[in-house]
Amino acid sequence: MATSRELKELLRPLLARRADLAFVRRTLFFQPFTHYLRGVEFTTSRFLNASRGFSFAHQLYNGQNSVDFDGGPGQHRYMMKLDWKDNLERASSELCEEMERRALPPIEPIVDYVEHQKVPEYIGGTDVRAPIRVFVAALGDCTVGAFDDAESKLAEVERYLPKYSASSATEEHRYHGYPLWRMAYLLRTLRTARSEALPLLHDWEAFAVKSSKLTKYWKPTPFPCEL
């Protein structure tokens, strides 16, 4: 299993020629990033000796305190060869080429929700009615000013999951670790103080970036409907 330091050394040629890329811990990503963190996460496993890489696009303004590397069917996945240490130059060349030609191109354009919708394999899950996908869509609606659509989507989830209703959401749920409570909090905001919806998303984005300790690579920007 390649360590973070070993991975960075293997990726050094790519990082040297691509100023738009950075590598932190076990994550290769585009920088500076705005509303989406896009890149490749190299996972660890007790059961595999080979390092695996997963391309991802994480919607930062969902208030989650960690990056979600999961995607849906079609998400790019890569496994390093078990004998990569036998020829480091070859391993580096193969890894850099895989990242630059196949892993990164599909996710590079995902800088906002409009582009995110074009590549559903990086939204996560398989059922468009799943709450996590509804949350992605509702958040995206807010960024383009479609607040009625966002409220309607979240209200549908509230109908079949009444435990997580907007009326039950409190300030304690603003940064709650369970996304259904953040969904309820956003729905409450849309119903009672709609003008605070975009400031909430900006706050969630800042919270996510700081929690991931990636602030130096982040460029805060307005949402499309604020331009």
Image (cartoon, rainbow, N blue to C red):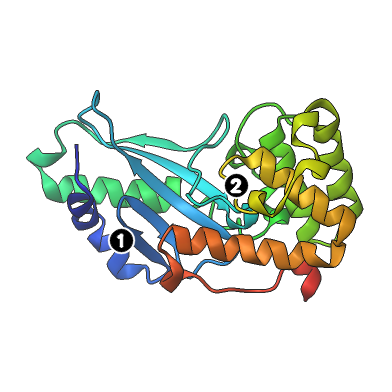
- On screen, residue 223 versus residue 36, left or right, reads right
- Outermost residue, top side: 47
Q: Residue at x 86, y 34 (%)?
A: 156
In percent of width and height, residue 200 lies at 70, 63
Three-letter amino acid code at disc 2? His
Q: Residue at x 68, y 38 (%)?
A: 180
Q: Secondary structure at mark 1?
A: helix
In percent of width and height, residue 111 lies at 61, 61
Neighbourhood count class around disc 1 (C-alpha, 10 Å): few under 14, some 14–19, many 20 upward: many
* Residue on which the image places disc 1: 14
* Residue on which the image places disc 2: 176
- Outermost residue, left side: 86
Within the image, what quadrant is residue 15 found in? bottom left
Within the image, what quadrant is residue 114 found in? bottom right
- Quadrant of the rendering where the N terminus is positioned: top left
Q: Residue at x 51, y 44 (%)?
A: 68
Q: Earlier in the sequence, mark 2 or mark 1?
A: 1
Of 68 and 14, which appears nearest the observer? 68
- Residue 30, numbered circle: none
- Outermost residue, bottom side: 227
> In the figure, 220 relative to 118: above or below?
below
Instruction: Residue 118: tell me if it is visible.
Output: no
Instruction: Residue 202: tell me if it is visible.
Output: yes
- On screen, residue 175 versus residue 113, left or right, reads left
- Quadrant of the rendering where the C terminus is positioned: bottom right
Q: Secondary structure at mark 2?
A: loop
